[in-house]
Image (cartoon, rainbow, N blue to C red):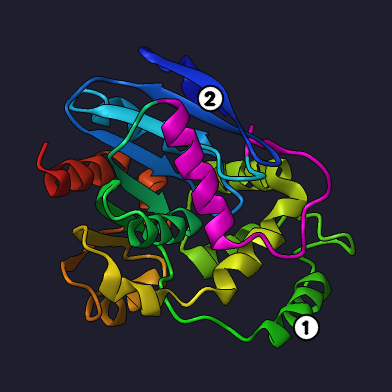
Amino acid sequence: MSDVSTLPGFSEGHIPVVGGRIHYVVGGQGDQTVLLLHKLGGWTSEWRGVMPILATRMRVMAVDLTGHGSSSMNGEAPFIATQEELASHLMATLNEVDEHTVSIVGSSIGGCVGAVCASLWPERIRALITVGSALGGGVPHSSLKSDAAEAIADGLFDSNEVPLPRPHSFMENIFGMRDPAHMEEMTLSRQAAGRWIQPCARGVALYDYLSILPRIDAPVLMAYGTNGNYGRFAEPAIALMKNGQSEAIQDASAFPHQDKPEDTATSIMSFLGV
């Protein structure tokens, strides 16, 4: 898969944070900066179709979340990687590259972390766009161990919680994915994230996003692909927001930034007014 740091006009770097370092790719010019965050078990390269388009209008930065892609952490992954921890690593990265105010576009967990950032640092987040993100209520802590055991029993992870390859039929049924190349890339990016996937997933599961949505001042767009099943989260979440709206991206999976990068980029630029 292509490395987005090799896209014309883009470069990469690493920022030291507590416990490790965060990898980022940056390029483009403009009065606004947009921060792109990948899916759970994803990486920056999944934005390669969107980044060059956005870079014609604004500064674009893509980050590998904690434990994902080329971001590395010292020591073993914890049982739970909280949303607050992932969000603080993002803020530390932005501080190091002198980006005070950004708009966040996040797929899956990326949109969830973006919502946490918008709630905790309202002065730093100009706008938030979620792409196939499940902004719902949290689950009880007591269910986490049984859920972990079930994921192992279902063959999604081995006994050490290392991700196992998933059948294409699984990805089509769960995410509405149809492109075999995107399915294979997802397998590779999950391998790169390794044992950090489940701790990050548990951080998402525990967090009650519905409780923070009324506190988000930034305008929010919840985008989703019509072939995925994440559109169902939009209506109840938007009802709690000060300034939220939804948009369906036609004939796209839960990851429309990969299936329909031009349509996704157009939606982003339109919402941000660039």
Instruction: Tell me the magenta residue range.
Output: 69-97
The numbered mark at residue 271 is none
Q: Residue furthest top?
A: 8
Between 115 and 236, which is closer to the camera in this rendering? 115
Q: Is residue 106 left or right of residue 220?
A: right
Depth check, mark 2 against mark 1: the one in front is 1
Image quadrant assignment for residue 149: bottom right
Identify the residue at horizontal 29%, vertical 54% (top origin): 129
Query: Residue drawn at (12%, 45%), measured in percent from left and top?
Result: 270
**Cα distance in 3D space between marks 2 and 1:** 37 Å
Q: Which residue is mark 2?
A: 2
Q: Nearer the viewer, residue 245 or 86?
A: 86
Position of residue 107 measured from the top left corner of the image (x, y, whole percent): 42, 53
Residue 70 % position (x, y): 64, 32
Q: Quadrant of the C terminus?
A: top left
Q: Earlier in the sequence, mark 2 or mark 1?
A: 2
**What secondary structure is found at the residue carrying circle 2?**
loop
Quadrant of the frame with the N terminus: top right
Neighbor class of circle 1 (other Cα within 10 Å; few <14, some 14-19, many 20+) is: few
Residue 2 vertical placement versus 42 (above, below)? above
Give the quadrant of residue 140: bottom right
Corner quadrant of residue 19: top right
On the image, the x and y values in percent for residue 259 come to 38, 47
Residue in the image at 36% along x and 39% along y: 35
SS type, badge 1: helix
270 or 126, which lies in front?
126
**Left/right of residue 49 with respect to residue 96 in the rendered view:** left
| Residue depicted at x 49% and y 64% | 175
Q: Residue 85 magenta-drawn?
A: yes
Mark 2: amino acid: Ser
The residue wearing badge 1 is 146
Q: Amino acid at mark 1?
A: Ser
